[in-house]
Each structure stands twice: as structure tokens, then as C-alpha cells.
Image (cartoon, rainbow, N blue to C red):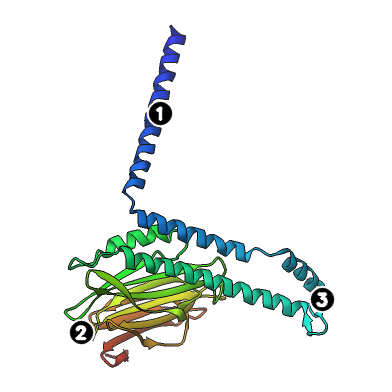
């Protein structure tokens, strides 16, 4: 009887486990079925492209040989007639790698832009910004940091969708990522690519993008900030970009500042506060937006 009871309990456990697995498989199947085919297709394309980053970064046998020779004598000649040294050839290889990485990054961004143009509906009065973010987060999963962001310009003059992404290539430093702030304007029932900017934020991480209260009707102003990857400390860069429905312009920029800072949007501008790096000094700045640009408000105001 005890053996029969044990077998029956084991059978019930197996049935429960099978039911759980079946339910999980059904849920996964339903999730796949409810996923926009274009989202899934673009995600696979981006994933395949992103895998090329690792391939490009993997040293070739020649590169490994050159690195071993350079460990002994980087000035050794490779080709005496051309004056090519081991060090110079390694520099050439590195330059080709950077070019190949950038090309893959551009192809990924091109896939994202093509998805926006072909799949995001502009026939309604409002563009579903949250759905755009959800879809792009799936498409760029593991490829971009931070997750993609989206903003909408809606005015009597113009309607547009703006997206921001920062594609990572697996390295650190000034060419480790490709930042893109891209605008798509409404043209009838669809979106068309309008303009793109943000390249001077390449190589930055811990990115933050905040919409400001635009001082110009029919424009959207965004504050973009981040920290240089690979730097010997927090090296912060900030930019304000304005989009007028046709083109981006840099409304404000300043030299990088060492330190860790937070930003806060105000009614007519923004504030920056935090501690400077390796210093007892505290930073607090208040900026006011005008149609002519940004102005720092004196501390006593």
C-alpha cells in the first residue's frame, strides 16, 4: 500500500510538472504569435548584424602574430621597401576594425529606421510612443544602452516622432558606441525620415535624454547627457538639441565637466547639480531657455 501511495504521489507530481511545462510553452507560443512579425524579423536582422561586432574584434592569426612580434620589437620592419613596421601594420588593422565596426553600427541603425518608416502608423491623431519604445526595446535588446527612448512633437504645424538609441559595439572609449537622435515626420498616413544628429555623443554611456519645455512653438528641445566610457573618472558631456520639424540644431553645448551630476527640468529650463570629481566643490547651475538659445541664470537670482 505504501508503495502504491508513493507511486500515485509521484504520478501526480509528474502530471503537475507536465501541466506547468505545457502552460509555459503555451504562454511562450502565444507571446510569439502576438508579436508583430516585423518586430521579430527586424530583431533577428539586428541580432545577426550585432554578432559581427564580436567577429570583427576577434584577432586574426596575422594580428596575433604581429602582436607577439610587437611584444619583442614593434619597430621591426614588415616591408622595408614601403617602410612598414609591425607597429604601423597593427595601427592599420585597428583602423580597419574601427571602420568595419562603424559600418555595422550604421547598418543596425538603418534597420531600425526602416522599421519605423514601414511599421509605425501615423494615421491616427496620436503616435503610440509607448508601443514604439516597447518594439524598439525588443529589437535592440542587448545591443543598445540605455534602452531606446521615443518622443513626440505634436503641434498645429508639424507632427513627428523622435527616437534615441545608443548602439554598443563591445569596446570602450570614444568609438565604443554610436548615438543617434533621429526624427521622422508625419507625411500623410506614414512617417518619413527627416533628420538625425547626436554623433558627438558617440562613446558615451549612462545616457539620459530629457524633454525640455520648448521656448519656440512648433519645436521640441531635448537635453542629452552621458559619461565617456573608458575615462579615468566620470567625464560628463551635455548637449541640447532642438528640432523644428525639418532639421536638428545644437541649441547648447559646453566643454565636458569631470563629476557626477543630476539634471532637473524646470518650467523654463533645467538645473544641473552634483559633486565635481576628486573635489570638495559642489556644482549647481540653472539654465533658462529662450528662442535665441540657453543662458545660465546667476546664482543670486
- The local crowd at label 3, few if under 14, some if 14 to 19, many if 20 or more residues have their Cα within 10 Å, is some
Sequence-earlier tag: 3 or 2:
3
Q: Which residue is mark 3?
A: 73
Q: Where is residue 240, by image quadrant? A: bottom left
Mark 3–mark 2 distance (CA, rounded to whole Å): 63 Å
Mark earlier in primary sequence (2, 1): 1
For the residue carrying disc 2, how many other residues have a C-alpha within 10 Å: few (<14), some (14-19), or many (20+)? few
* Location of residue 246 in the rendering, given as x and y in whole percent from the top left corner: 30, 83
**Distance between the alpha carbons at the discs numbered 3 and 1:** 64 Å
Q: Quadrant of the N terminus?
A: top left
Q: Which residue is mark 2?
A: 217
Q: Is residue 256 above or below residue 116?
A: below
Q: Label 1 belongs to which residue?
A: 18
Element at label 2: loop
Residue 270, located in which quarter of the rendered image?
Answer: bottom left
Residue at 82% from the left image edge and 72% from the top image edge: 72
Residue 77, percent from left and from top: 82, 80
Asked if marks 3 and 1 touch (Cβ < 8 Å), the reply is no
Amino acid at each position: 500500500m505504501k508503495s502504491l501511495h508513493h507511486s500515485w504521489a509521484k504520478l501526480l507530481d509528474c502530471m503537475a510538472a507536465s501541466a506547468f511545462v505545457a502552460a509555459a510553452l503555451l504562454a511562450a507560443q502565444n507571446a510569439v504569435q502576438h508579436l508583430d512579425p516585423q518586430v521579430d524579423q527586424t530583431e533577428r536582422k539586428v541580432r545577426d548584424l550585432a554578432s559581427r561586432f564580436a567577429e570583427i574584434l576577434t584577432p586574426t592569426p596575422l594580428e596575433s602574430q604581429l602582436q607577439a612580434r610587437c611584444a619583442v620589437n614593434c619597430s621591426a620592419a614588415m616591408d622595408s621597401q614601403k617602410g612598414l613596421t609591425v607597429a604601423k601594420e597593427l595601427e592599420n588593422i585597428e583602423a580597419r576594425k574601427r571602420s568595419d565596426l562603424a559600418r555595422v553600427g550604421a547598418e543596425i541603425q538603418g534597420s531600425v529606421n526602416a522599421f519605423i518608416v514601414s511599421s509605425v502608423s501615423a494615421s491616427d491623431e496620436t503616435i503610440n510612443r509607448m508601443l514604439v519604445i516597447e518594439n524598439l526595446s525588443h529589437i535592440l535588446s542587448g545591443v543598445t544602452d540605455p534602452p531606446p527612448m521615443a518622443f513626440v512633437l505634436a503641434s498645429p504645424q508639424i507632427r513627428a516622432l523622435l527616437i534615441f538609441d545608443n548602439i554598443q559595439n563591445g569596446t570602450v572609449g570614444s568609438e565604443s558606441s554610436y548615438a543617434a537622435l533621429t526624427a521622422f515626420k508625419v507625411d500623410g498616413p506614414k512617417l518619413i525620415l527627416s533628420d538625425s544628429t547626436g554623433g558627438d555623443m558617440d562613446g558615451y554611456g549612462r545616457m539620459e535624454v530629457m524633454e525640455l519645455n520648448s521656448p519656440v512653438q512648433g519645436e521640441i528641445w531635448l537635453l542629452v547627457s552621458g559619461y565617456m566610457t573608458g575615462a579615468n573618472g566620470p567625464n560628463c558631456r551635455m548637449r541640447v538639441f532642438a528640432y523644428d520639424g525639418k532639421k536638428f540644431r545644437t541649441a547648447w553645448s559646453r566643454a565636458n565637466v569631470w563629476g557626477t551630476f543630476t539634471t532637473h527640468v524646470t518650467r523654463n529650463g533645467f538645473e544641473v547639480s552634483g559633486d565635481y570629481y576628486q573635489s570638495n566643490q559642489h556644482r549647481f547651475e540653472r539654465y533658462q531657455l529662450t528662442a535665441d538659445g540657453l543662458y545660465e541664470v546667476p546664482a543670486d537670482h
